[in-house]
C-alpha cells in the first residue's frame, strides 16, 4: 500500500511541477510588523485571483515560513486562507540563524493533522530556505545582508524535512531551495542543486548596479542571469520565486523606480519571458517591509485595479543587445554593495558573463530581513 501511495504521490507531484503557476510572495507580517492573520491573507489571495486584465489567474502563493508570526510552532493562518480561497501553496521553511528546523516541521505537521488533504492537496512545492546562500556569500556579507546559511546546512535541512514528511501526504511534493541567481552559478553550492527537485531563483535586474541597469536593459539582464542559472543547474526545473521592479523609491545606479518602469518590467520580463511559461511568483502584490524604501507592490491597497494595466502587449522592446551597457559610475553610497562589479565593470559590464555572475540581488535581501527579524523574535519568545 505504502509504495503505491508514494508512487502515486510522486506522479501527482511531478505532474504538478510541470504547471506554470502564477502567484505572488507573501510575508508573515504587515508593514507595521504586526502579524498577518487569516483575514489578511484571505484579502491578498482574493485580490490576486481577481486582478483586472491579469494575463492568467494568480492563484498561487509563496510563503517564507510555516509558522504564524510571533508564535513558536503554530501553523501560519495563511494555510486556512488558502483553503478558503483555493490558493495553491509554495511552502517555505526559514533556514537561517538556526541549528535546526524543528519548529517549522512541528508547525507543518500540526497543519497536516488539523486540515488533512484540504491543505495538502493545495501544496505545490516546498522551499527549504530563502536566499540563505546569498546572505552567506562574499557579496551578502559585504552588503550586511544578515544571517545566512551555507550549502551543507541547507542540504541537511532538506534531508531533515524529507524524513519528517516521509509518511505524510506531502511526501511526493517537489522540494526546492530559493536563492539569488548568482548563488546558483557558484560552484560551491552545487550540493544544493543536487539535493533539490527544482531550483528557485530570485532575480532583480533593478539591483544589478554597475551593469547598465536602466529599465531598457532589464529584459536582457534578466535573460542573461536566467541563462546563466540554466547553464548551472543541469536541467532541473527553474521556478522564478521573486522578481519585480519598484514603482517608487530611490534610484539604484541607473535603475529608476516608477510606475511606468514597473509596467515596462511587467511587460518585458513577466509577459515576454515568464507568465504561463515558467512557474512565477511576482514580487509583489503588497509591500510588507517598511525598511525597504523601494516599493514593489503592484496594488496600493489590495485593490483589484493595480497601479498599472496588467494587459500583456503583443510585441516587445527587448532585443538581443543592450543599450548603454557601459559601466556607470557606481555610487558607492547608493549600495555599499557591488565593489566587485565596479572592479570588473571595466570589462564592459553587462557584456561579460563574469560581471553578470558577480551580480547580486543586493538590496533584495530586504524581503528576507523582515522574515528573519521575525524568526529571531520568535526565537526570543521561545526562550521565555
Ligand atoms: C560561493 O559559495 C560559497 C558557499 O555558499 C560562499 O562561501 C562563497 O562566498 C561564494 N562565493 C562568492 C564569490 O560569493
Ligand atoms: C485603492 O487604490 C485604488 C487605485 O489603486 C483607488 O482607486 C482606490 O480608491 C483605493 N481605495 C482606498 C480605500 O484607498
Image (tube, rainbow, N blue to C red):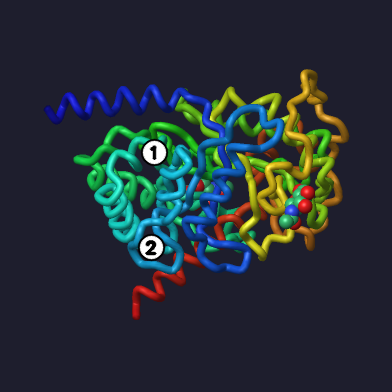
The residue nearer to you, when weighing 269 against 108, is 108
Q: Which residue is mark 2?
A: 98
Of helix, strand and loop, which one carries label 2? loop
What whole-number distance in Å separates the C-alpha atoms at marks 1 and 2?
25 Å
Where is residue 156 drawn, in percent x and y? 31, 49
Mark 1 vs mark 2: in front: 1
Where is residue 45 drawn, in percent x and y? 55, 45
Of helix, strand and loop, which one carries label 1? strand
Give me the residue at 49% from left, 66% from top: 374
The residue nearer to you, when weighing 31 against 154, is 31
In this rendering, would 335 be left or right of 44? right
The residue nearer to you, when weighing 79 against 322, is 79
Where is residue 114 drawn, in percent x and y? 27, 51
Give me the residue at 39% from left, 32% from top: 197
Q: Which residue is mark 1?
A: 123
Is the residue indicated by label 2 positioned so its CB lies within 8 Å of ligand 1? no
106 vs 34: above or below = above
Amino acid at each position: 500500500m505504502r509504495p503505491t501511495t508514494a508512487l502515486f504521490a510522486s506522479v501527482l507531484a511531478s505532474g504538478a511541477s510541470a504547471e506554470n503557476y502564477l502567484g505572488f510572495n507573501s510575508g508573515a507580517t504587515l508593514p507595521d510588523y504586526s502579524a498577518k492573520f487569516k483575514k489578511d491573507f484571505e484579502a491578498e489571495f482574493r485580490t490576486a485571483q481577481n486582478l483586472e486584465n491579469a494575463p492568467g489567474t494568480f492563484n498561487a502563493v509563496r510563503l517564507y515560513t510555516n509558522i504564524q508570526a510571533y508564535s513558536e510552532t503554530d501553523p501560519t493562518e495563511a494555510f486556512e486562507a488558502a483553503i478558503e480561497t483555493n490558493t495553491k501553496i509554495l511552502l517555505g521553511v526559514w533556514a537561517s540563524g538556526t541549528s535546526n528546523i524543528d519548529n517549522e516541521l512541528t508547525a507543518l505537521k500540526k497543519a497536516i493533522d488539523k486540515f488533512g488533504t484540504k491543505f495538502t492537496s493545495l501544496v505545490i512545492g516546498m522551499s527549504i530556505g530563502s536566499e540563505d546562500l546569498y546572505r552567506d556569500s562574499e557579496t551578502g556579507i559585504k552588503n550586511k545582508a544578515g544571517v545566512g546559511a551555507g550549502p551543507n546546512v541547507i542540504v541537511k535541512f532538506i534531508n531533515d524535512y524529507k524524513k519528517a514528511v516521509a509518511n505524510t501526504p506531502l511526501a511526493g511534493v517537489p522540494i526546492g531551495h530559493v536563492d539569488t541567481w548568482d548563488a546558483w552559478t557558484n560552484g560551491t553550492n552545487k550540493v544544493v542543486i543536487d539535493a533539490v527537485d527544482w531550483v528557485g531563483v530570485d532575480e532583480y535586474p533593478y539591483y544589478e548596479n554597475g551593469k547598465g541597469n536602466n529599465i531598457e536593459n532589464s529584459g536582457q539582464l534578466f535573460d542573461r542571469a536566467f541563462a546563466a542559472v540554466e547553464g548551472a543547474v543541469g536541467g532541473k526545473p527553474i521556478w522564478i520565486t521573486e522578481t519585480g521592479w519598484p514603482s517608487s523609491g530611490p534610484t539604484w545606479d541607473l535603475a529608476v523606480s516608477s510606475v511606468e518602469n514597473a509596467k515596462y518590467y511587467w511587460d518585458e520580463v513577466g509577459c515576454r519571458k515568464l507568465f504561463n511559461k515558467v512557474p512565477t511568483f511576482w514580487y509583489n502584490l503588497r509591500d510588507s517591509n517598511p525598511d525597504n524604501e523601494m516599493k514593489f507592490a503592484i496594488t496600493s491597497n489590495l485593490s483589484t485595479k493595480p497601479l498599472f494595466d496588467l494587459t500583456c502587449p503583443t510585441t516587445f522592446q527587448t532585443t538581443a543587445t543592450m543599450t548603454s551597457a557601459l559601466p556607470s559610475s557606481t555610487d558607492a553610497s547608493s549600495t555599499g554593495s557591488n565593489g566587485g562589479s565596479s572592479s570588473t565593470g571595466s570589462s564592459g559590464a553587462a557584456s561579460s558573463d563574469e560581471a553578470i555572475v558577480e551580480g547580486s540581488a543586493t538590496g533584495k535581501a530586504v524581503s528576507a530581513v523582515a522574515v528573519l527579524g521575525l524568526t529571531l523574535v520568535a526565537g526570543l519568545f521561545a526562550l521565555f
